[in-house]
Image (cartoon, grey):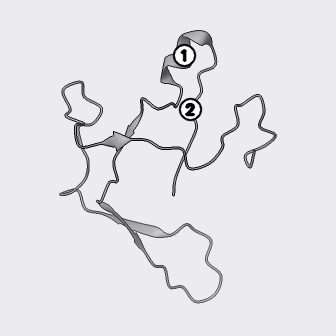
Amino acid sequence: MTGFILQGNTAAEEILNTNDSWKTIKDESYHPLSVRALGYYVAGPAELVDMNSHVSGWEKPVFDDGKWVKARQIGPGLTKDAAVNSMG
């Protein structure tokens, strides 16, 4: 699972904060590729992106997100004031 918290720095930016108004969809165009390397390998896994099934145009005001579902909480989150480091 992948998740994140978006939190504005000021009250004017709080409209962007993650909450139950967010919607989500699984982008089926991404597929991880296994890496086989002999010896030491220092890179993340590769991925294949099939642009024929990629979710595109989502950032445009006319995009139909009717098939998207509400985002759900997958664990407790900490605000930036409460977090100690990148691990919370």
Q: Three-letter amino acid code at disc 1?
A: Glu
Provide residue 25's location: percent of width, then percent of height: 33, 48
Mark 2–mark 1 distance (CA, rounded to whole Å): 10 Å
Q: What's the residue at 59%, 27% (across, down)?
A: 7
Q: Seen from this angle, which residue lies furthest right?
A: 84
Do the residues under discs 2 and 1 have CB atoms within 8 angstroms?
no
Front-lying residue, 41 or 28 = 28
**Which circle's residue, 2 or 1, is located before the other in the chain?**
2
Provide residue 72's location: percent of width, then percent of height: 48, 44
Front-lying residue, 8 or 18 = 18
The numbered dot on residue 13 is 1
Front-lying residue, 37 or 55 = 55
> Would residue 41 appear left or right of 53 to someone viewing this image?
right
Q: What's the residue at 56%, 50% (across, down)?
A: 74
Q: What's the residue at 61%, 77% (across, down)?
A: 41
Residue at image mark 2? 6
Q: Seen from this angle, which residue lies furthest bottom?
A: 38
Query: Does dot 1 land on a helix, a strand or a loop?
Result: helix
Query: Does dot 2 land on a helix, a strand or a loop?
Result: loop
Provide residue 58's location: percent of width, then percent of height: 27, 36
Front-lying residue, 11 or 68 = 68
> Would residue 63 appear left or right of 77 to someone viewing this image?
left
Does residue 63 lie above or below 32 as drawn? above
Image quadrant of residue 69? top left
Does residue 73 lie above or below 17 as drawn? below
Q: Three-letter amino acid code at disc 2?
A: Leu
